[in-house]
Amino acid sequence: MKAVARLVWSYFTGTRWHLAFTLIGATMMVFTFFVMLTQPQPRSGERFWIAILGIMFFFVGSSLMPVMFGRLARGHSAGILPGGRVKLLLSMFATILLVAFPVGVLWPVGVTLSTGTALELMKDPRAREFILQTAALLFSSAVLIASWIYLALWFLTSQRNMAGLFKALLVIAVVIFAPAQDIQDFTVSLKWTLLQIAITWSVFAACFLLWPRFKAARARRGRERFSGFASALAGRTAGREFDVLLGTANPWLLVLALVLPFVIATRFTGEFAAVWLYFLAINSAIVGAYAGQAAERSRALWLRGDWSRAALFACVERSVWRHNGTVLGALLVLTVAVGAYLHFSPTTMIAGLLLLVLGTNVSTNLGLMMTRGLKWPEIVAGIAVMLILMASAELVAREHVNLVAVGALEVALLALAIVLRTVARRRWTNLDWAMCRPDRALTARGAS
Amino acid sequence: MNDTIQASNLSKSFGDKQVLQGMSFGVAPGDVVGVLGKNGAGKTTLLELMLGFTAPTNGAMRVFGHDSYSLPGDIKARVGFVPQQDELLDQLTVADQLRVISSFYPHWDSALISRLCGEWGVNLKARIKSMSVGERQKLSILLAFGHQPDLLILDEPVASLDPIARRQFLEQLLTISADGERAIVFSSHIVSDIERLANRIWILKDGKLDWQGDLDSLKESIVRIHVRGSGAELPALKIPGALSLQREGAFATAVVRDWSPAAQDALEKSASAQIEVEALGLEEIFVELHR
């Protein structure tokens, strides 16, 4: 238990930033809880938002978990440490329970906003039963969603390749569409949610704990038999040598990684235009983010061609756009297909397609701008891009599209894309490969 | 001015951390430079400056007469590099990786690479992601050899090789350097390899080039001396350049830098003592310099 507690503590406090987020989040939640428990509440419920903000801070505070979990699980540590895999698994589950707990507490407090203080309300048995049941349902739903989100983050951070991206997208598709389906069918129930948690965690735990045995068995039987398809797929990296070194030679893998979750999602979702556009917009951002590895990978190119840093940027940009343009094309085709099926109005269709083009453009430039790892400017720009994309998707999906609002947001995206490209170009002219990747930057700082 | 590498007053810092300071050196064709230093001494940063991966904070680094930060293509084609951590493409086979890299160079010695693949046991059909760390390192080295560079820079190239592969690699480096036209700069923690291969040694300490010169000069300059006094007790000894000193009665042992016959004469006269000089191995020298 000591190891599990230590791990959980490290997830929330591992760096100064995580500690700060955790403390701020916890303080905001405790403050709101205390105020709501003791003070009569205004009907507007503004204090409730302080707690929601606190939950978000607390969640960000725990974001070290998938990174640490992934590193420990994939390295030798999990195998060497006594009970390593079990303790890691427990630490992950404990973190998720901790993150989800405030949601379960927040709801019963929140419902007292219009009716009086929580202590008075809890004296009524029927109200108490309702509050407790709802709290349990919210808590279990939060556990389920947090589990999926962490799983996606784990795939993204631990497997920095196409397989990891594909798995993460698959998980994101489930996270986006399964709740939508539940809401549409009115099937949200405590029993069903608990069953989902049990299945999810049983499968994940079984895979995680039995993975070393599976790996050993696979090695004994010869990995070629099992990985034939994957190897064949990965081996098709034909293309210009420049693109091969940059990792942009084969856009079809990314197309597959985007389309397959999309197709699977059609099994879950209903006719929510906003949900589909959300998904497509997020995918357009992911396509662009693929450019984030360009600076790091271009190091291998620097010594192998007659280009200055500025010329290298021009070559890299062309290569990235050849790759991302193909994937964007596939996304646009998907959008047209979805639009035809859901009978999008011409305005929605045009604005939606434009949104994807702009989303890919701005995130591609954001990716190219990442020449010094992920720092605050990149994080702020990334959050801004996602918020604008989501807001635009929601506005575009409405029955009566507010053209002024949509136009303003899309112009904002275009302006952001131009600014980011200018920054990217400037950064590449002084590209310092010693600082390209966070771990490389640390190494450089350590000057080993 | 015919130096392969020329650095003057070179400094590099990352934020507040000064990694390298005030370094000046030259590397000429035929030089095989072994770079020694503790972890964090700045070896990798120094090599990355030579390759133009990063810019110096102060001073200048010139490779084949060009500023290393903006090397033209024809100069880059004369440089080979083996990084500390390989940069191979996991999804390719060895043959594919060789094909990809060779396509960047106007001249590629396929015969040499085929021969070395055979000698080093590198399977051309193997997929890189299934290769061991040592096999990957061998391939990284092959990729740096193929275009027969005039300057070969290697950042701890043998750390993951087994003794046989290490020996083969060193033999190949000796072959490359034998014509006296190429320069090799390599860092390693395996002092015996540097001792065997390098004709010039750089020792980095606290971001500075603490020592640079040929191996013989280093061994003559830093020695262990045994002092035997004429009386029962040695008088107070003042040994210029002493790195360490141990006394016991009429005897004393010291490791001294900048040792010379003149310094020996002076000490023998001032201490009225007999002095025996013992040569040190490179590893001992390195340890003594870092006490």
Image (spheres, coloured by chain):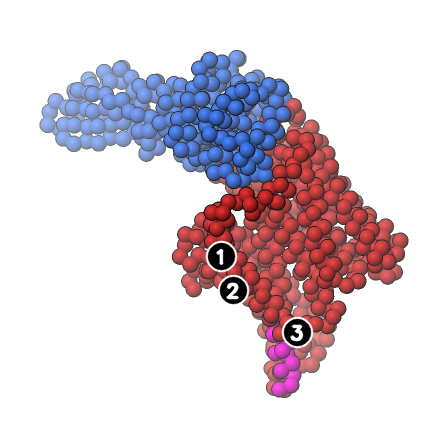
Asked if the magenta segment contains residue A14, the reply would be no
Query: Residues at marks 2 and 1, common chain?
Result: yes
The first of marks 3 and 2 along the sequence is: 2
Judging depth in this view, the residue of B9 and A29 nearest the camera is A29
**What color does chain B have in the rendering?**
blue
Q: In this view, does B152 lie above or below B94?
A: above
Q: How far apart are marks 3 and 2 (CA)?
A: 23 Å
Q: Is residue A311 above or below residue B131?
A: above
Chain (red) = A
Q: Indicate which disc residue A210 carries.
A: 1
Q: In which quarter of the image is residue B173?
A: top left
Q: Indicate which disc residue A94 carries.
A: 2
Q: How many labels does the image show?
A: 3
Please give left or right for residue A312 compared with residue A442 in the image: right
| Magenta range | A125-139
**Residue at 66%, 55% in the rendered image:** A170
Q: What element carries label 3?
A: loop
Which residue in the protein does label 3 denote?
A189
Q: Looking at numbered disc 2 in the image, what kind of residue is underneath it?
A: Ala
Predominant SS along the magenta part? helix
Q: Quadrant of residue A430?
A: top right
Q: Mark 3 lies on which chain?
A: A
Residue B242 screen position, x and y as percent: 28, 27
Q: Mark 2 lies on which chain?
A: A
Q: Distance between the residues labelled 2 and 1?
A: 20 Å
**Residue at 47%, 47% in the rendered image:** A220
Q: Is mark 2 on a helix, strand or loop?
A: helix
Q: Looking at numbered disc 1 in the image, what kind of residue is underneath it?
A: Leu
**Residue at 81%, 52% in the rendered image:** A337
Q: Which residue lies furthest to the left in this view?
A: B232
Residue B238 screen position, x and y as percent: 24, 26
